[in-house]
Amino acid sequence: MDIAIVGRHTKVNDDMRERITSKMEKIAALAPKATRVEVHVVHERNPRLAADAERVEITLHDRGVIRVEASADDRVVALELAAARIGDRLRKLHERRANRHNGAPSLREVVEADAAAATPPVGNVESWEGAPGDSVREIPLDGTPIVIRSKTHSAEPMTVSEAIDQMELVGHDFYLFLDSETQLPSAVYRRRGWTYGVIHIDPESRDAAERKSA
């Protein structure tokens, strides 16, 4: 597995690089099919964010993209936190996949059962392949110390189970993807317990409604 270490607004010394390499080699044991991991060490220059001045972002390219980050006033502490988080997510993923072979319902079965009870019903989702890449922008909100982080994702095909796996791995309550059958923008999201929902956005339905009202 390739390990790329990048410093943003800071230099990463040899000692820190050795620590990162050691941590990532342990992560590789949990993700033997991973091809690359990118570790960004970021120094926050804003003095008001001194308690979170050091941030470590880890992006692992496995079957999909697994991303975590952690902040602290010390970059070694931030690295420990981020490595622990990505390790926890990989272990949960392994447990979820193992349960599929032990009589537990698959994520697809759970989603389809939940969708069948919804109104209106959600259409079938066929196979997707690959994982989304993304770009990140930080946009300051005028007149405030608030910074909005904007990401643009490329939508490559994946199954609904893979979309839910990716949602769980990145630690979000929802995950955006593109339906390979209908080519509609879609999202899976977490409901209470171990249930999930799927939302499809159809821009043509709006056009049809506007033509009907015209």
Image: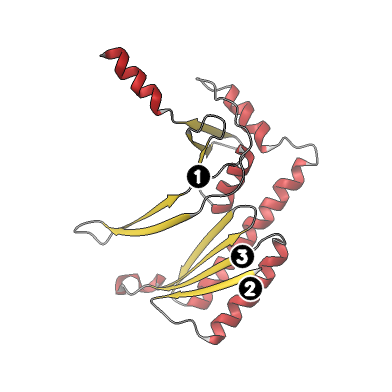
Q: Residue at x 54, y 45 (%)?
A: 156
In the rendered structure, which amino acid carries the disc numbered 1? Ala
In the picture, the quarter occupied by the C terminus is top left
Numbered label tally: 3
Residue labelled with disc 3: 36
Residue labelled with disc 1: 155
Q: CA distance from mark 3 to mark 1?
A: 20 Å
Between discs 2 and 3, the one toward the N terminus = 2
Q: Residue furthest bottom?
A: 14
Between discs 3 and 1, the one toward the N terminus = 3
Q: Nearer the viewer, mark 2 or mark 3?
A: 3
Residue 193, percent from left and from top: 60, 37
Between discs 2 and 1, the one toward the N terminus = 2
In the rendered structure, which amino acid carries the disc numbered 2? Lys
The quarter of the picture where residue 203 lies is: top left
Front residue (pair 76, 192): 76
Residue 195, percent from left and from top: 60, 35
Q: Which mark is residue 23?
A: 2
